[in-house]
Image (cartoon, rainbow, N blue to C red):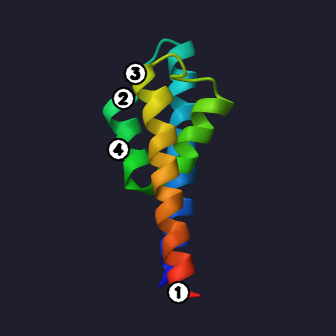
């Protein structure tokens, strides 16, 4: 069961990371953008680590307080839950 959670989290993190990269590219090329709600939703649905890393790697949304504060909090909560589940199952 824990493997499914870890795989799900990894996949969601990859999707969130890619979404931040794609949105940054679209911002630079003046194209249709991914909404902030969607970026946050991807983080909340298990992609907190990928969203945070995407924000840092692509330097995207770093000036928005809701992202600068919200994404690290989401990531910390998700990592804490995963650590709790792993420790509980060991």
Q: Nearer the viewer, residue 31 or 58?
A: 58
Contact, mark 1 vs mark 3 (Cβ under 8 Å): no
At x 63%, y 23%, the residue is 59
Disc ID at residue 89: 1
At x 36%, y 29%, the residue is 36
**Which residue position holds label 3?**
32
Q: Nearer the viewer, mark 1 or mark 2?
A: 1
- Distance Cα–Cα, label 1 vs label 3: 44 Å
Q: Nearer the viewer, mark 1 or mark 3?
A: 1
Disc ID at residue 41: 4
Q: Earlier in the sequence, mark 4 or mark 3?
A: 3
- Distance Cα–Cα, label 1 vs label 2: 35 Å
- Distance Cα–Cα, label 4 vs label 1: 28 Å
Q: Earlier in the sequence, mark 1 or mark 2?
A: 2
87 relative to 52, above or below = below
- Distance Cα–Cα, label 3 vs label 2: 12 Å
Tag 4's secondary structure?
Answer: helix
* Label 3 Cα neighbours within 10 Å, binned few <14 / some 14-19 / many ≥20: few
Coordinates of residue 61 in the picture (x, y in percent): 50, 22
**Left or right for 81, reference 50:** left
Contact, mark 4 vs mark 3 (Cβ under 8 Å): no
Tag 1's secondary structure?
Answer: helix
Coordinates of residue 38 in the picture (x, y in percent): 35, 38
- Residue 54, by quadrant, is top right
* Label 4 Cα neighbours within 10 Å, binned few <14 / some 14-19 / many ≥20: some
**Which residue position holds label 2?**
36
Q: Quadrant of the C terminus?
A: bottom right
At x 54%, y 58%, the residue is 79
Coordinates of residue 82 in the picture (x, y in percent): 51, 67
């Amino acid at each position: 069961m824990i493997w499914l959670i870890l795989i799900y989290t990894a996949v969601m993190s990859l999707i969130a990371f890619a979404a931040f990269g794609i949105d940054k590219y679209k911002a630079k090329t003046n194209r249709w953008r991914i909404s902030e709600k969607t970026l946050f939703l991807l983080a909340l649905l298990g992609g907190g680590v990928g969203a945070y890393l995407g924000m840092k790697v692509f330097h995207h949304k770093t000036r928005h307080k809701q992202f600068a504060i919200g994404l690290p909090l989401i990531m910390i909560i998700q990592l804490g839950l995963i650590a709790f589940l792993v420790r509980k199952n060991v």
